[in-house]
């Protein structure tokens, strides 16, 4: 019996990039930005120019990408279980090319069971083929012809009433995504 090819995003799916960024912002400035106030995918559409300047300084710091970026709870075990089950995992990240090496290092450190050949840096995620895509960006989901799984985040709830139109399944954890994949795969195999 064959197993599915699953495209998995990194930021907002495997790591807690925005939470960690906002924590670093608070440590740097003493000011708080509410995570739930980020209601659009592009952080630039929500924050002031001064806030963005600090955020970009955080993202320009390679120490942040190496040491301050946390893994989403349960994602290591779930992805390991998926690989063990025979799912072909394709990690697709839209990180800038200058940070790709750091991203691959972070992934290899936390997810050593993922073949580095299956890690792709690409902003056009629809170019990467698979049976399922797990993503936090609605724009990336609707462009893809795979079964679409949206990791719930404050920035992707606008327009959720159209999920049925775009055939998007919403989940809160990677374990929920895995259960959905297994359920659908049994039906289509």
Image (cartoon, rainbow, N blue to C red):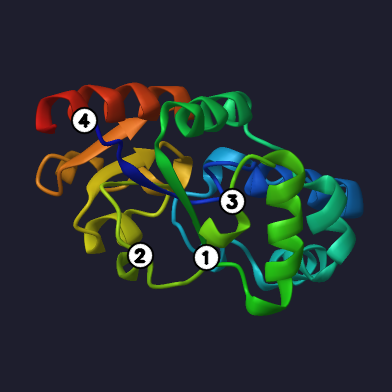
Q: CA distance from mark 2 to mark 3?
A: 16 Å
The answer to whether residue 53 is above or below residue 169 is below
Q: CA distance from mark 4 to mark 1?
A: 24 Å
Quarter of image, res 148: top left
Cβ atoms under marks 2 and 1 closer than 8 Å:
yes
Quarter of image, res 49: bottom right
Label number found at residue 120: 1
**Which residue is pictured at 14% across the width and 32% down the height?**
189
- Of label 2 and label 1, which has the lower sequence position? 1
For the residues carrying marks 1 and 3, which lies nearer the camera in this image? 3
Secondary element under disc 1, as helix, strand or loop, is strand
Q: Residues within 10 Å of mark 4 (few under 14, many from 20)?
A: some
**Which residue is pictured at 38% across the width and 65% down the height?**
125
Q: Residues within 10 Å of mark 3 (few under 14, many from 20)?
A: some
Decide if residue 173 is in sight here. Answer: no
Label number found at residue 115: 3
**What residue does disc 2 label?**
128
Residue 57: give x, y in percent of width and height: 81, 69
Secondary element under disc 2, as helix, strand or loop, is loop
**Which residue is pictured at 90% across the width and 54% down the height?**
28
């Amino acid at each position: 019996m064959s197993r599915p090819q699953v495209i998995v995003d990194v930021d907002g799916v495997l790591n807690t990039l925005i939470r960690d960024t906002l924590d670093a912002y608070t440590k740097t400035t003493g000011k708080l930005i509410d995570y739930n106030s980020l209601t659009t995918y592009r952080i630039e559409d929500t924050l002031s120019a001064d806030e963005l300047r600090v955020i970009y300084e955080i993202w320009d710091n390679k120490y942040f990408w190496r040491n301050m970026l946390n893994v989403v709870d349960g994602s290591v075990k779930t992805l390991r279980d998926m690989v063990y089950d025979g799912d072909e995992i394709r990690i697709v990240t839209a990180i800038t090319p200058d940070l790709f090496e750091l991203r691959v290092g972070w992934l290899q450190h936390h997810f050593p069971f993922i073949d580095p050949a299956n890690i792709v840096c690409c902003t056009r995620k629809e170019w990467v083929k698979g049976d399922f895509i797990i993503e936090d960006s609605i724009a990336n989901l609707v462009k893809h012809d795979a079964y679409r799984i949206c990791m719930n985040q404050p920035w992707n709830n606008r327009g959720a009433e159209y999920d049925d139109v775009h055939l998007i399944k919403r989940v809160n954890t990677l374990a929920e995504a895995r259960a959905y994949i297994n359920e659908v795969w049994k039906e289509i195999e």
